[in-house]
Image (cartoon, coloured by chain):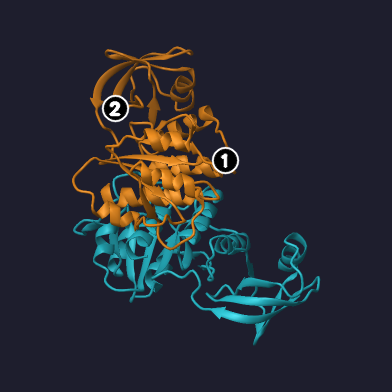
Chain colours: A orange, B cyan
Amino acid sequence: MELFYTSNIDGNQAVLDAIESTHCMKVLRHRVGDTVSVMDGKGTLLRCRIAEYRKDGTLLEIIGREENFGAHNYDLEMAVAPTKNIERYEWFLEKATEIGIDTVVPVICSRSERKSIKTDRCGKLLLSAAKQSLKGRIPLLRECCRVEDYIRECDKDRIRLIAYCGSVEGAEKSSLRQVLESCSGGNVKISIMIGPEGDFSSQEAELALKCGFRIIHLGKSRLRTETAAVVACCSVYNMLG
Amino acid sequence: MELFYTSNIDGNQAVLDAIESTHCMKVLRHRVGDTVSVMDGKGTLLRCRIAEYRKDGTLLEIIGREENFGAHNYDLEMAVAPTKNIERYEWFLEKATEIGIDTVVPVICSRSERKSIKTDRCGKLLLSAAKQSLKGRIPLLRECCRVEDYIRECDKDRIRLIAYCGSVEGAEKSSLRQVLESCSGGNVKISIMIGPEGDFSSQEAELALKCGFRIIHLGKSRLRTETAAVVACCSVYNMLG
């Protein structure tokens, strides 16, 4: 099943942009009258009839809608420090999208060697991963933010976790699995923080704890930042999905 | 902690090869008399004193041993069809090693677009991933084999699973999680087959079933071959690790 994308939707009409039009009409050689599947990036799958081909935008007639296409039973926000090697972060974005994630927040920590990411490039990557894995909704990529700001502003209604390799005196540390086993019912809202190559600083971990985050570990293995992030996504997918 | 590797061990002496010697003495500037950590690739961590530096091989005196260094509580064999894009397969090898795996078998299926892999290159990759993630044992990479041979020859004492997207009439399909929840005690031996881009053929799935494999699914998401393989490794790590 091939999936196209457009955000240009008005009533029962949708328009594919120039790139999607070329892919649809030239590469895949669709014709006017053909039926195609289009995602709106917000969770809806549209069944469309190709009404008119224009280079700058193919006109589609919407003949059916499927809400929550490819949706999962939880709301997962991953706040992950960008990796020094950006390819590793991009790999995390692709895999997390395939597995099932809702929001990515690149958090900049005191030990972060990388302080920014190319949001456009990462956005394109999330779109193609969502199309490839048949998800109607493209994960939201937030702007980079300082980890202290994220910790303070993270929604208090969410289960908020920080994967910290160190320890904070007097604070207990559970495995992510233990935390997830105690989650009941559907659509659990969960936020997980993954630190940079050098881990979070003790100050960052203490602040998180003070603000209501729980400290977790991801098992015995020593995992790279991007691997830890994917392992956390897998655990949520495995336990709550 | 930096970890060196050698298979050249005799009694209380070990020798680093030329490449490891250069890395140890020139790059990291160790000196004779320093203590270093060395893995034998079979699960043992050696504490060694540098006795003598030679370009072609640094001589080490073994002063301590730690068995089962970085070991996990299960035995996981992943029989995964090589991906068309070999980088995706190499990525699976690296991540699976970090998470915790014992054996990789590249299985060639009727729908495999790639029929071989560079075993040397993949072996080097497994070694560096094991060193990086502080695992004393390098996962065993078996030679490519036909999927039918693997299915017939896979050890009957193992929990044998095939992740098949299709269905076989009359055969039930459980989630990997359900299967793992029913696993009791430590050191569970488990083999999981992951098919190529086009999935296993129905004949391959039927043969596996006939030979005692159980059909599993990995949840609702549509996963690429290498993502499915890593998700399966994560589930085992999460549930049995």
Work out whether residue A113 or residue A91 is closer to the camera in this orientation and state it: A113
Count every numbered label the image shows and give the total.
Answer: 2
Q: How far apart are marks 2 and 1 (CA)?
A: 31 Å
Q: How crowded is mark 2: few (under 14 residues within 10 Å), some or many (20 or more)?
A: some
| Residue B20 locus on image (x, y percent) | 71, 67
What's the amino acid at mark 2? Answer: Thr
Tell me: residue B185, above or below residue A189. below
| Residue A153 locus on image (x, y percent) | 37, 32
| Residue B85 locus on image (x, y percent) | 54, 47
Label 2 lies in what chain?
A: A
Label 1 lies in what chain?
A: A
Looking at marks 2 and 1 on the same chain, the residue that comes earlier in the sequence is marked by 2
Q: Most extreme residue toward the bottom, as rendered?
A: B11
Q: Residues within 10 Å of mark 1 (few under 14, many from 20)?
A: some
Q: Which of marks 2 and 1 is in front?
A: 1
Which quadrant of the structure image shows residue A186? top left
Question: Which label belongs to residue A86?
Answer: 1
| Residue A7 locus on image (x, y percent) | 38, 20
Work out whether residue B15 or residue B165 is closer to the camera in this orientation and state it: B15
Tell me: residue A63, above or below residue B26. above
Residue B167 appears in the figure? no
Work out whether residue A11 or residue B81 is closer to the camera in this orientation and state it: A11
Left or right of residue B15: residue A238: left
What's the amino acid at mark 1? Answer: Ile
Q: To which residue does mark 2 refer?
A: A44
Q: What element carries label 2?
A: loop
Work out whether residue B75 or residue A143 is closer to the camera in this orientation and state it: A143
Q: What element carries label 1?
A: helix
Residue A20 appears in the figure? yes
Please identify the quadrant where the N terminus of chain B is shown.
bottom right
Q: Are marks 2 and 1 on the same chain?
A: yes
Taking the spot 72% from the left edge, 63% from the top edge, the residue there is B23
